[in-house]
Amino acid sequence: MKLPQENETCPVARAVAAVGDRWAMLIVRDAFDGAARFGDFQRRLGVARNILADRLRTLVELGILALRPAADGSAYQEYVLTEKGADLFPLIVALRQWGERHLFAEGEARSALVEKGTGLPLAAMLPRTQDGVVADSAAVLVRKPA
Amino acid sequence: MKLPQENETCPVARAVAAVGDRWAMLIVRDAFDGAARFGDFQRRLGVARNILADRLRTLVELGILALRPAADGSAYQEYVLTEKGADLFPLIVALRQWGERHLFAEGEARSALVEKGTGLPLAAMLPRTQDGVVADSAAVLVRKPA
DNA sequence: CAGTATCCCTCAAGATACTG
DNA sequence: CAGTATCTTGAGGGATACTG
């Protein structure tokens, strides 16, 4: 994929280039959900081992995941989210909320992301201005770099 | 890409399958930014025409874009965001804010999404519980479908 | 202008066998 | 268990010529 210059200064384009392939966000999703070992991801995703190894390596290179010794003292290592990776949480929630709203039929079975204490789903996540007013796309504009 | 059953009930996985390819979100981004005609997208993205035609067709099939007669009365048609497409705005903002924070060096040139009135950037968009408290990933869990 | 039709090529992805 | 090595396939993507 060959992006024109314009896109190199666009954070959206860079983000898509970094985590916009078909596996990255699913790996990150599972990391948020407690997956840490190679086998965890492999079982949950059902992805071929070589592909998984490659994607994990890339995510480590990008600084989204980090390797550390397994917490249980076994000889292996674990993949954990870095701060950069943890900051993808809003993106996961945005994907999930859009998917819930538009890709499932009424009453169709689906997993849900709920608050631990109450069991309630999260509030709809919407962009807001600095003073807390919901900002729809008509209220904003893209300012090109100087 | 062959997803295991688990993923078919996960809204994140479905969302990635729908708009997780390398062009969809860039097309949607440009639609939010005023692109409407085939040539608009082609010039902005620099993508091959056959690929663009295919992606636009897919987005229309998915109900994210719709075709309507051009507003200027010309013989051609325009691609406009449907409600389903407009609901991708938080996802675009999530991509952008993560990209801004983690994929640009300090002071590096980048485009910015600002409020029309004030010129100020939007507030950081964070998941919240129903009562408005910021919810980080440790505060939630994924509840599997029955 | 807005696509379609071809051709070509690379890489992602899957399957599977193997190794420390 | 956590990968690597190898092979094969197919889809995604690019370039370009053509058409209503």
Image: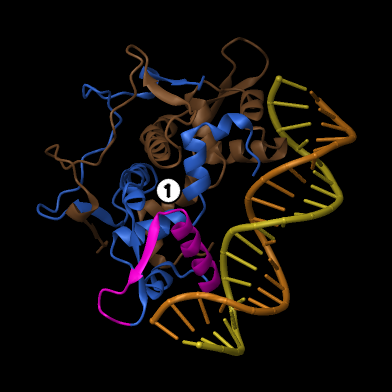
Chain colours: A blue, B brown, C yellow, D orange
> Is-magenta flag for residue A136?
no
| Depth order, front residue of A55/A43 | A55
The N terminus of chain B, quarter of image: bottom right
Residue A65 in the image: above or below residue B54? below
Residue displayed at 20% across by 41% down: B128
The answer to whether residue B57 of the structure is visible from this angle is: yes
Image location (x, y in percent) of residue B57:
60, 38
Image location (x, y in percent) of residue A47:
49, 68
| Depth order, front residue of B48/A143 | A143
| Left or right: A101 as drawn, with respect to A117 | right
**Mark 1 surroundings: few (<14), some (14-19) or many (≥20) residues within 10 A:** many
| Depth order, front residue of A32/A114 | A32
| Depth order, front residue of A17/B49 | A17
Instruction: Determine the chain carrying the residue at label 1.
Output: B
What's the amino acid at mark 1? Ala
The C terminus of chain B, quarter of image: bottom left
| Left or right: A26 as drawn, with respect to B57 | left
For the residue labelled by badge 1, is the local secondary structure a helix, a strand or a loop?
helix
Image location (x, y in percent) of residue B37:
61, 23
| Left or right: B126 as drawn, with respect to C3 | left
The magenta segment is: A49-74
Which image quarter: residue A31?
bottom left
Residue displayed at 47% across by 36% down: A12
Residue displayed at 39% across by 32% down: B89
Residue A122 in the image: above or below residue B67? below
| Left or right: D14 as drawn, with respect to A95 | right
Residue B68 in the image: above or below residue B130? above
Residue displayed at 33% across by 19% down: B120
The residue that mark 1 highlights is B15
Image location (x, y in percent) of residue B101:
38, 38
